[in-house]
Amino acid sequence: MRRWVFLPLFLAGCAALYILQRSNASAPITPRPLLYIVADTQREAERIPLALTRVSDQEEIKVGQKIAMDYGLPSQHSDNPDVARISAYLNSVGDKIAEHVQRKAIPYHFYVQDDRNLVNAFALPGGHIVVGRGLLELIESEDELAAVLGHEITHVDNRHAIGSLQYELASRKIGLGEAYQIGRPAVEVFEAGYTKDQELEADRVGLGLAVAAGYSPAGAVALLRRFQQLEPADTQRAASPIEEFAEVPFSALAEYFRSHPPASERRAALEGEISARGWDSSRPLRPLGIRMIFLSDAGERLNRAGNFQTSIERFKEALTLDPTYVRAWRGLAAVSWRSGDARETARAEEEAIRRGAVGLDWPFLARALAASDPKNGLSRLTALEEGAYGNTVYGVPAVNDSFRSAKVNQAGFEFLQGNKNALADFQAILRDAPQTPSIQAAALYVMAWWTYRAGKLDVAEKELQNAHQILPGYGGVDLQLAWVLTDLGRQADAETLVDSPKQIDRAERQALQAVLKWRTEDRQGAALQFEAAARTDPVWMVPGYVENNYSNAAASVIKQLQAGESARRLKEMQERRRRLVQR
């Protein structure tokens, strides 16, 4: 009987499709919209009897708890402090919005799925709301987040979520109690989204919940405007500053657009609702209290890609939002070092250490101070070390390994400045340190770098050989030893170490191989190896980075390789332009 109901609709749709195809419409016409109409209509028809068997709030809560448990939400835990901070923030904002729901018996819980490929959010029955990290990266204000959470809360409050599950269960001819066993497949039902009307309803009602909680309606409009820039139909997408900021995984974002109506339509509907309800869109937007996390994520990706200036801007923007965020200070130090700016590296690392960062920060800071402030750098390093571990300034608990790292780098700095007692001081530090291979090898490796930078290649070789004997293959010991050996003219010995499968820094290995080939008069091979190194990691085209990390002799060779690679790139660009002109 039900099929006869759909037959007139199907025939009318076919007729409309025929007329449109015969007209002068410029847009391509396909049967797909018709199939969507038929499918949605049939789906809504399937829902009619489900209203007669409405699930109680308590039963919905039980079903939702079981699905959430099977999905691992209640036990969700991460050692990453950023994830914990995001989760706490989501619950803080979500709780404000949930105060205004109709069904007060439903408790709400908010979770972050720590996956930037999930550019979406979904709601499970019983008030479990999941937001993907990929979606959070696109949000720029708390008001935008409130609109997203309000949208998902509405899917629960207006029974879209439990209704969707009822439909799926009914279509499989099983009872509602079976929801306790369907686990992950149930979650996929909610990830897939709802009907167009339900999505628009969730936009409208959800924004009302956010406004009732004190948020500006302009947040939802701003977010949908950003989504318009990212929709596949937008041909200007590649030039969007949003992509530059977030490096959006568009394949994942496509799933969001498939499960929601077009952003332009949603935006127009919300703007009409805002006008009709008289909501105040001039209310200022609140800063997103976790945005510095996603700005730092973007900064780290941009740093790895060699886009140093934009990376620096992201970290500085993060610190404008939260000057206490240590990760952003460390990220700023890292990208500044790779961009060749030792002065900014030292400033950022000092701030990171003052705010509690220790350990690997000490060698980084010491090297930056040696490069940018050789006159006062040692006193700055000493004062900071005394403040951190003497608890005289910063109140940072002393950590033995980090304390030794600070002392080793202090001794190295003194050696660089010509202090004859520095090596003896270092040996004393080494004797007092735990005799575990990793700690001993690490200390020798750090001191070897300072002696290498001071031009004392024989001392550097000795320290590195000792580190190699204590813990073969430790960190970058063999690679650093290869740099020392090539400066000593022992190219064959250096080549043996470079070819070791233990060398994991591919770009540095390629750069060192280029230097070795240059010094053995294989200029063509050197150019090819250096081209590969610069392609693997753009940092090798930064003169300041090379000068701050390697000996004068090695830096001199790399400078010539950089000049050759720059000339090759210029010639390649000119050739591309010539071909374009000829077309």
Image (cartoon, rainbow, N blue to C red):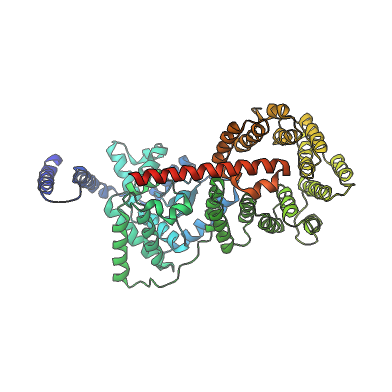
**In the displayed structure, does residue 374 sit left or right of residue 179?**
right
Between 549 and 109, the one lying in front of the other is: 549
Q: Determine the residue positioned at 81% across, 48% down.
A: 416
Image vertical order of residue 182 relative to residue 86, above or below: above
**In the displayed structure, does residue 455 sit left or right of residue 356?**
right
Between 527 and 69, the one lying in front of the other is: 527
Residue 470 on image: x %, y %:
79, 31
Which quadrant does the N terminus fall into?
Answer: top left
Which quadrant does the C terminus fall into?
Answer: top left
Between 128 and 414, the one lying in front of the other is: 414
Image vertical order of residue 28 relative to residue 523, above or below: below
Is residue 98 visible in this depiction of the protein? no
Corner quadrant of residue 563: top right
Q: Determine the residue positioned at 20% across, 46% down.
A: 28
**In the displayed structure, does residue 436 sit left or right of residue 574?**
right
Q: Determine the residue positioned at 52% across, 51% down.
A: 298
